[in-house]
Image: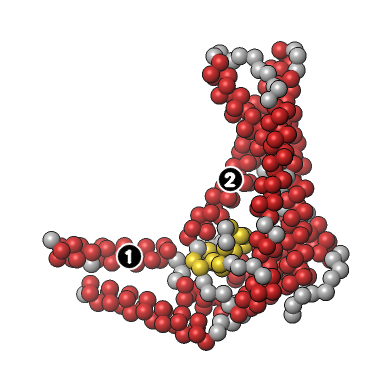
């Protein structure tokens, strides 16, 4: 049963759904911070590195989801 | 005929004001006139203007309000940039900055200032700061609370006066009661829209003044010019004075800017 749930969760249809949902949810926080920087605002180094970390984690998770599917 | 009707629904500020006034006056006449025929005439006028009034109200206030609330729910809170932190410390207001995608305005809701991504893309950083300062002025001045405080005496005045209204019975007593309740709610809405125009405009001018002091006159003027199409600069609304008036008023302000 748990296996079924996992395979269902990671089915192509669901990965696509997750992707479309995240697109629908729009820009991530790090992208919004990037937009603010682009518009000429400044952030302290700490915030920038934290946002960078979050962006990397988001990309890694996305990548992991794709790999699991394959 | 349909195009005429649609044009009528795009009524300008003064035409809308006439509709609101007609709603209130026809309802008052309906409840007070001694002659039954005149009462029905007043009822007919009320029925004719309340439809367009409800459409105008829905389109100009209800829908934008719902849209802004949904955008707020979908918006994401972001860390405050250094420039905004300086503004926050200078104004002494605590707030959460949220960004909503696709939106081209800024507003304050609860403890948050919500700005749209289109707003960010259209304006320079100094102009964005001026926009945020304007919204923070609303928050600092507790303008929502003030508006409610001003509304209460007007509503009390209205309920006292309208408690004396009488009505002929339409079909049954309960139907008449439902009809009268609906009519009075519509009338109260129209009344509040009219009496709140001056307080709303005053509070907008105050927020502009505050923004001009903290972010510079030119920046707040530029925000106003960029966010509203040039052909609409002379148009006032129930909640905001016209852009031309606001710019004129900002120009007439005499003060020392509080930050650079």
Q: Nearer the viewer, mark 2 or mark 1?
A: 2
Front-most of residues A43 and B242: A43
Front-most of residues B17 and B186: B186
Alpha carbon separation for disc pair 2 and 1: 33 Å
Residue drawn 28% across the image and 77% down it: A64
Residue A69 left/right relative to B168: left
Quarter of the image where one finds residue B109: bottom right
Q: Is residue B158 above or below residue B98?
A: above
Residue drawn 62% across the image and 60% down it: B107
Residue A67, how many percent across, how many down?
Answer: 25, 77
Residue B245 left/right relative to B54: right
Quarter of the image where one finds residue B42: top right
Q: Is residue B76 above or below residue B21?
A: below
- Badge 2 density bin: few <14, some 14–19, many ≥20, Cα 10 Å: some
Tell me the residue that label 1 is attached to. A18
Residue B111, how many percent across, how many down?
Answer: 57, 61
Residue B219, how many percent across, how many down?
Answer: 73, 71
Front-most of residues B222 and B188: B188
Residue drawn 45% across the image and 82% down it: A50
Q: Which secondary structure lies at badge 1?
A: helix
Task: Kindly identify which chain the residue marked by label 1 belongs to.
Answer: A
Tell me the residue that label 2 is attached to. B62
Residue drawn 69% across the image and 43% down it: B151
Residue ranking furthest to the bottom: A45
Quarter of the image where one finds residue A43: bottom right
Residues tagged by mark 2 and mark 1 found on one chain of the structure: no
Task: Kindly identify which chain the residue marked by label 2 belongs to.
Answer: B
Residue B22, how many percent across, how many down?
Answer: 73, 31
Q: Is residue B105 in sight in this rendering? A: no
For the residues bearing labels 2 and 1, Cβ distance under 8 angstroms = no
Q: How many marks?
A: 2
């Amino acid at each position: 049963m748990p296996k079924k749930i996992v395979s269902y969760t990671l089915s192509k249809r669901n990965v696509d759904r997750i992707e479309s949902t995240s697109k629908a949810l729009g820009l991530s926080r790090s992208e919004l911070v990037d937009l603010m920087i682009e518009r000429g605002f400044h952030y302290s180094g700490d915030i920038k590195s934290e946002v960078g970390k979050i962006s990397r984690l988001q990309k890694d998770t996305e990548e992991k989801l794709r790999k699991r599917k394959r | 005929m349909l195009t005429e009707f649609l044009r009528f629904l795009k009524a300008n500020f003064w035409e809308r004001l006439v509709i609101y006034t007609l709603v209130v006056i026809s309802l008052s006449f309906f409840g007070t006139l001694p002659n039954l025929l005149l009462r029905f005439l007043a009822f007919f006028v009320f029925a004719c203007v309340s439809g367009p009034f409800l459409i105008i109200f829905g389109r100009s206030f209800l829908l934008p309000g719902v849209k802004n609330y949904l955008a707020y729910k979908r918006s994401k809170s972001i860390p405050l940039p250094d420039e905004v932190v300086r503004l926050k410390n200078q104004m002494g207001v605590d707030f959460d900055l949220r960004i909503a995608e696709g939106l081209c305005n800024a507003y304050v809701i609860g403890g948050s200032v919500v700005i749209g991504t289109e707003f960010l893309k259209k304006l320079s950083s100094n102009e964005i700061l001026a926009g945020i300062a304007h919204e923070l002025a609303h928050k600092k001045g507790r303008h929502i609370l003030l508006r409610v405080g001003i509304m209460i005496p007007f509503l009390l005045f209205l309920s006292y006066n309208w408690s004396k209204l009488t009505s002929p019975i339409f079909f049954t007593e309960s139907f008449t009661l439902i009809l009268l309740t609906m009519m009075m709610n519509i009338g109260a809405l129209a009344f509040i829209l009219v009496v709140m125009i001056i307080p709303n405009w005053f509070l907008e001018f105050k927020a502009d003044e505050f923004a001009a002091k903290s972010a510079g006159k030119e920046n707040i003027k530029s925000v106003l010019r960029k966010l509203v199409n040039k052909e609409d600069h002379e148009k006032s609304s129930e909640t905001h004075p016209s852009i031309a008036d606001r710019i004129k008023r900002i120009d007439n302000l005499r003060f020392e800017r509080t930050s650079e």
